[in-house]
Image: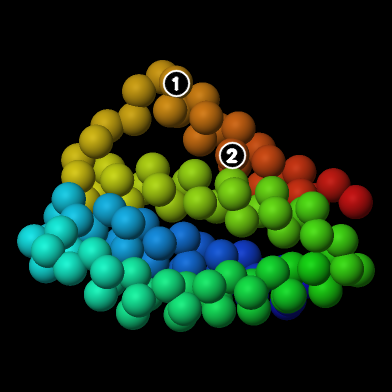
Amino acid sequence: MRNLLSGVGLFIFAQALIWIQTNGQFVWPFFKKNPLLISIIGGTFISYIFIKGTALVAEHFDGALWPGRFLGQATGIVIFAGMTFLFLNEGINTKTGISLFLAVLLIGIQIFWK
């Protein structure tokens, strides 16, 4: 269980960094003026976090990769929604709310269904 929690924690951290890297241009002028620099600085570090998170989650699931893929994607949806609301004040409409519910459901299925 420790590997699973650590891996999901890394996914959440990496998803937050990806949000900053790709959407920071709408929040901070420096990001808009320097996209190449932002991609060079962040890209390798963020990829490394995803690689380590994938390894931990795959180890928890006895080498299976699909659970980690679903967990990574679903955590990305949840983090994107939260950070977009927090930084850009974009509300959550019915369609987005249902999608978030499905993402949380997907996370629950991957973690609790044996």
Q: Is label 1 in a helix, a strand or a loop?
A: helix
x%, y% of residue 103? 59, 39
Residue bearing the label numbered 1: 95
In the rendered image, which quarter is residue 35 located in?
bottom left
Residue at horizontal 41%, vertical 19%?
94
Work out which residue is located at the far left of the displayed protein and give it.
Answer: 29
Q: Is residue 37 above or below residue 17?
A: below
Q: Spatial distance from mark 2 to mark 1, Cα to Cα?
A: 12 Å
Count of labels in the image: 2
Residue hosting label 2: 103
Q: Residue furthest top?
A: 94
Q: Name the spot of residue 111 as percent of width and height, x first.
A: 75, 54
Residue 62, quarter of the rendered image: bottom right
Q: Is residue 18 left or right of residue 8?
A: left
Q: Amino acid at mark 1?
A: Lys
Q: Eyeballing the image, is 67 above or below 85?
A: below
If you read the primary sequence from the N terminus, does the residue marked by circle 2 or circle 1 appear first? Answer: 1
Left-right relation of 15 to 40: right
Q: What residue sits 58% from the left and 70% below the top?
A: 50
Q: What residue lies at 61% left-to-right and 56% top-to-bottom?
A: 72
User: Which structural element holds mark 2?
Assistant: helix
Q: Which mark is residue 38?
A: none
Say which of 3 and 15 sits in front.
Answer: 15
Residue 111 seen in the figure:
no
Residue neighbourhood size for the residue with mark 1, other residues' Cα within 10 Å, grouped as few (<14), some (14–19), many (≥20): few
CB atoms of marks 2 and 1 within 8 Å:
no
User: Against 99, is 14 above or below?
Assistant: below
At label 2, which amino acid type do we have? Ala
